[in-house]
Image (spheres, coloured by chain):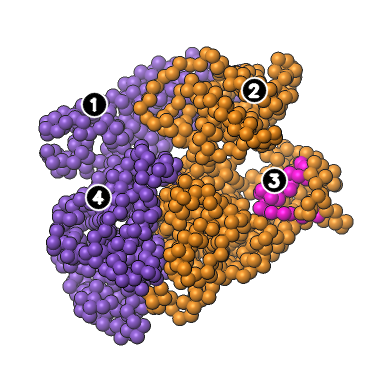
Amino acid sequence: MAETKGSGLDKNNKYDRQLRLWGDHGQSALEAARVCLINATATGTEILKNVILPGIGSFTIVDGHKVRGEDVGNNFFLLADSIGKSRAQVATELLGELNDDVTGNFVEESVETLLESNPDYFSTFSVVVAINLHEKALLQLGGVLWEKNIPLLVCRCYGFIGYLRLAVREHTIVESHPDSALEDLRLDRPFPGLQTFCDSLNMETMTKKEHGHTPWLVLLYKYVQEWKKTHDGQIPKNYKEKNMLKEMIRKGIRQNEEGVPELEENFDEAVTHVNSALVTTRIPSEVQALFDDPCCTNINSESKTFWILCRALHDFVHNEGNGDLPLRGTIPDMTSDSERYIQLQNVYREQAATDMTAIRNRVHALLQSLGRPCGAVSDNEIKTFCRNAAFLRLVRCRSLAEEYGTNTVNKDELNMHLESEEGDDLLFYILLRGVDRFYDEYNRYPGRDNSDVEPDIPKLKTCLTKLLHDWGLSGTVKEDYIHEMCRYGASEVHSIASYMGGVVAQEVIKILTTQFVPINNTYVYNGFLQTSTTVQL
Amino acid sequence: MAATLKGVLQGSLADNVKNSKILVVGAGGIGCEVLKDLVLTGFKTIEVIDLDTIDVSNLNRQFLFRKEHVKKSKSQVARESVLKFNPDVDIKAYHDSVMSPDYDVNFFKQFTLVLNALDNRAARNHVNRMCLAADIPLVESGTAGYLGQVTVIKKGLTECYECQPKPPQKTFPGCTIRNTPSEPIHCVVWAKHLFNQLFGEDDPDQDVSPDTEDPELTAEAGQSALQSEAKTDEIGGIERKSTRVWAMNTGYDPEKLFNKLFRDDIKYLLSMETLWKKRRPPQPLNMTQLPSDTDGNSSAIRDQRQWSVKECANVFSDCLGQLKKELATQGDGGMLVWDKDDETALDFVASVANIRAHIFGIAMKTRFDIKSMAGNIIPAIATTNAIIAGLIIMEAIKILSGKIKSCKTVYLNRVPNDRNRLLVPCTLDPPNPKCYVCAPKPEVTVVVNCTRFKVGALQDKVLKSYLGMVAPDVEIDDGKGTIIISSEEGETEENNDKFLSDFGIRNGTRLKCDDFLQVYSLVVTIAHVEKLEEEKEFEVVGDLSELQPQEEQQQAANGSKPHNGGDKADEKEEEDDLMLIEEEEFEEEQQRMEEETRTTRKRKASSETEPTTKRSKTAEAQAAAGDNDVIEIS
C-alpha cells in the first residue's frame, strides 16, 4: 500500500474506513489521479473537498473569476477577506489544508482562454469536472476530452435543482461489485477436479459423523449425477423438477434404528441450495457483448490492457474453457468437517489457478505479438480480471455533441418526460437548457433580481418554446415549473451544493478506481421533493 | 449569503432560518457536514454536543479536523474551524454526553429544531425521548458506507425513533462463545473477552472457560453426572480460580497460558461428549508442537496476510509480554481497556481469535478483517456524509417553512435502483399507537423467570440497556407503592442482588417505571415463565393484547414453550424492521451488514411506486431478503 509521505500519518490508519470499501488497489489508483476542477463555485469546492479527503494525487483549479461577496456566502472554502482575489488561488489554498498528502495547483484563467491558448492543457488529467460552463465552452471542452477519452463530469446546482452529466467515450470496469452475484459452482458442468473429488467419496460406507458432515456441494453433485442418469443427462430445469430433486435429497438422510431420520444439517443445506446453486453456467450477456466488440476482435498495438485481457478471455472460453469463463474459485461456507471443506476449497482453487494460468499465457502471447513486454500486465491484474470475469462492464456515453446536436438529441426520452402527467425531475433538465437559452439572449439568468421574477416568466417561456421547437417537440412545460425556475434566480443553495458535491465526488471515485459502474449519463436531483432520476441523453 | 437565497427561501422562511436555534447532536462525519451546511444556509445560532475526541481514522471525512487536532474535543474543534471561516455565527460547543442530566427537557425546549448526527442507538433513543418530551421536531439520520438515510420525527405527527422495534443488537449465547464456536466472529468475541479477563475489567458475563451449564449438556440425563466427575477431576482447579489470578500467578507465562487455553481447556471441552456428537470436535494445540508454516504468502503486507498458527502463537507471546508491561504501569488494581486502534491490543485479539478458529476448524481471518469485526467498524466516506447532510438541511428547511407534512424519509442507495432512482423518498408514517415510548400510556410486557431474575438485571439489562432509560425509578403497582429501584444513589442498591420474586413480583405484576430526565413513564407487566429459549434471560414483548391470550392458552395447556408470545413479537419485528444505520462504529454489528442492507434495500426500493410508505417497503424487503438480520435506521 501507499507508504507514508507528506502528512507523516500512517495512511492505513487515516484511510482505514474507506480501504474497507475500495481496497488498497483502489486507494493506489486514487493516489495516482490528477483531478481538474473548472470553476471553484460552492459546488465545485464541495466536490473537490470530497475527493481530497480520501486522498487523490493532485488537483488543479481552473478559474478566471475573482471572489465576490456572493461566493463567500455559500462557499466554505472562500473567506470574507478573499473578496477581490483570484477564486482559483484562494480555493486551492484552503482546500489544500484538508489533506497534506494531496498537491493543489491553480490556473487563474477562464476555460475559454485556456482552450484557445493551449487546447492540449487538459490532456494530462485523469478526470475533469466542469461547473457552470456555457454551452459553447462546454461543447468545445467536451470535444477535446472526448478525443482523448478523458472522462468529463459536468455539474450544476441551480436553486433546488442539481444536475450531473458524465461524458466519457469508453470506461471499462473490472470490479463492478454487483449487488447480488450467484456463486460460480459449475454443478451443471462439473470440471474434472470436482468430479474426481466427489466421486472419491462414498456416502454408503461413511460413518454417521462423516455422513452428516459431507459438504452440501458434494451432496448436490451426487444427486444431480443420479438425476441426470434418468433425464437424458439434463439437470433439473424447472420448479417441479427441482422439487423432485429436493425430495431425492431428503430421502438420502440417514435413519436411526427406529427408522426416524437423523438431523443432518448438510442435507437441509443441500435442499435449500437447490435453487440458487443449480444454475446453468453461461456467459453473461454483458460479457458476450464485450467479446463481440470490435475493440476485442481487432486487438492492435494501441489496445488498452482491458481489451487485451478481454481477448485473452474470449480465446480461453473458446479453447481451454470449453465454452465457460474461468472458474471464480471460491465456495460459500457450509456445514462440513474442516478437512473435507478445505479439500473442496482446494479443488475449486486449483481449477481457478489452472484457468488463470491459461489466460495469463494467452495474455503474454498477445502482448508479445503486439511487441509489448509481458510485464505490461501484472499477474495480480490478470487474477483480479479472472475473478471478476462474469462482472466485467463497459460504459460508453453519448457525447455532449450528440446531446446538443439538433439531429442527434434524444427526442424520444425528452418527449416522454415532457408528456408525463405528474411531471418529473427531467423537466428541470429542459428548464436548465431553457435558462441557458435565456442567458444567450439577455446575458443574464431569469429572476436574478426579485423584481425580475414575474416579467421573466413569459420570456423564459418563449425561450423554452423555441428550444422545444428546435428539438421538434410540440409539448410545453407547465407554467408553475417555469415560475419556480425564475424564482431560483440561478442561485446556488449550499445544501444542494453539499448534496451534489457528494454525488459527483462519488462518481469521480468510481471512475478513478474503475470500481462500481458510474451513472450513464445524466442525473437530476430535485431537492424540494428529495427525488432524483438517471437517464441517457 | 442572503443574497443568493433571496428567491429560493421565500417570504418569512429566510427570517425563520436566521432566527432559529439549532441543536446538532454529534460532531462526527455527518455532524461536520451539517454544521457547515447550516452556517452557509444562513443559520445564525447553533449549539453542538459530542463527547468524543478526534481520531486519525476520522480525518478521511471529518473535514473540520486536521492531524494536529487528534485527541482533542470534536465539538470544540468543529466550532473553532467553522468560526474561522464564518466568524459572524454564534456557535456553542459542549464536550459532553447528550445523555447527561445537564441536558434536561428545558435544555431541549430552547431549540427550534434538533438535528441528530449520532453513531449509536442508545443516544438516538435518548434524544428521541427528549425531543418528544420537549415537543421539538427532530431530524434523524445515519450512514454506512455508500448507504444513508434521513427521516423526520415530530410528536403526535410521525413515528418516533422507537415506534418500530429494532432488530436486537447482535449478541451470541455464552455457550456458543465458550464451548461451541462455529463462526469467526465467535472466536473474535472470545478473544476480546480473554483480553478483558487477563488485562481489563472483570466481567462475569465474559468468562472464557468452558461452560458447564451449557443447556445442551443438561438436556441429556446422565450427562451431568459425567460432568461433575470431570469437574472434580484433573481440571477442577481451572473451575475455581479466576483466569486473571491464575495468569498473574504464572507471570503471564506465554507457554503456560497457551497450553491452558488452547490445550487443557479444549481437552476439557472434548470431555463434554454430547457437544461433539453432531459437531466437529476441536483439536487441542500444544505450544511446542504447532503445525508447521504453510501457505507462505509473505509478499503481502502484514495486515492483509493470513498468519499461520505458528505466527499467531508468536504474536500471542509477544503481546502477552507487552500487555503485561502496560498493565504494570497502571499500578495496583489497574486495568487496560481494549481499543481497536491500539496495535498491541488488536494483535492480541487477532492472534488469539485465529488460534481458536484453527482449533475449531473455523476459517482464519486477516488482521485487517479482525479489526473490522472486533471494532465493529463500519466503512465511512466523505461523499455519503455530504449527501446525507444536504438531505438533512432540506428537511430542516421544510420544517421551518411550516411544511413538516411534506417531509420524507429518504433512503440513499449505493447505485440507482431498477427504476433509475438513487434516492428513495417515502412518506412519513403516523405514530404507532402501541409504541412503548410515544404512545399516550406506554406499556410493555417483560417475560422472565421471577425466581431467577434479579432486580439489578431488571435495572441494567431491561430498563437501561434494552428500554433505553438513563436513570429509572421503579415502583410496584401493588397499592403499597413499594420502590424497588431508585435513581437516587444509595437508596436501593441493596435490592440489586435480590430476585424479583423476593418482592412478591410474579406473573401479572405491574411495575411503574419512570425516567425523570426523559420525562418518560412506562408500565411494565411481568410475565413469569420457567425458561426462555436460547439461554435468554428475558424477553420484551411490545403488544400486550397479542401476548395475553396466547400466554393464557399456553399456561392452560401447560405448554413447554410458554414464550410463544415472544415468538410472535419476533415475527412482527422482522416484518417491520427498519433500517437503522449508525454512523460509525456501533455495538455487536457484523461486518457483512453493508452488503446485507444493500441487497435488501435494493429490492425494496425497486418495486414500489414512490413515494410510498415505509411499512409496505420493509415488508417487501423482508419477503425478498428472508431473515437476514438486516440493519437499522431510525
Image quadrant in which you'd find residue A292: top left
- Considering depth in this image, is A288 or B300 the residue closer to the camera? B300
Q: In which quarter of the image is the C terminus of chain B?
A: bottom right
Where is residue A25? Give x, y as percent. Answer: 33, 39
- Residue highlighted by disc 4: A126
Q: What element carries label 3?
A: helix
- Decide whether residue B467 is among the magenta residues: yes
Relative placement, left or right, of A401 versus A16 is left
Cα distance in 3D space between marks 3 and 2: 35 Å
Relative placement, left or right, of B468 versus B186 is right
Where is residue A485? Give x, y as percent. Answer: 33, 75
- Decide whether residue A184 is among the magenta residues: no
Magenta segment: B453-475
Q: In which quarter of the image is the N terminus of chain B?
A: bottom left
- Residue highlighted by disc 3: B461
Please give the name of the residue rendered at 38% of the width and 38% of the height, measured from the top-left corner: A182
Which of label 1 and label 2 is nearer to you? 2
Q: Looking at numbered disc 4 in the image, what kind of residue is underneath it?
A: Ser
- Residue highlighted by disc 1: A358
Residue count near mark 4 (Cα–Cα under 10 Å), binned few <14, some 14–19, many ≥20? some
Q: Which chain is orange?
A: B
Q: What element carries label 2?
A: loop
| Comes first in the chain, label 4 or label 1 | 4
Relative vertical location of residue A221 with respect to residue B487 in this rendering, above or below: above
- Residue highlighted by disc 2: B251
Q: Looking at numbered disc 3 in the image, what kind of residue is underneath it?
A: Lys
Disc 2 chain ID: B
Chain A visual colour: purple
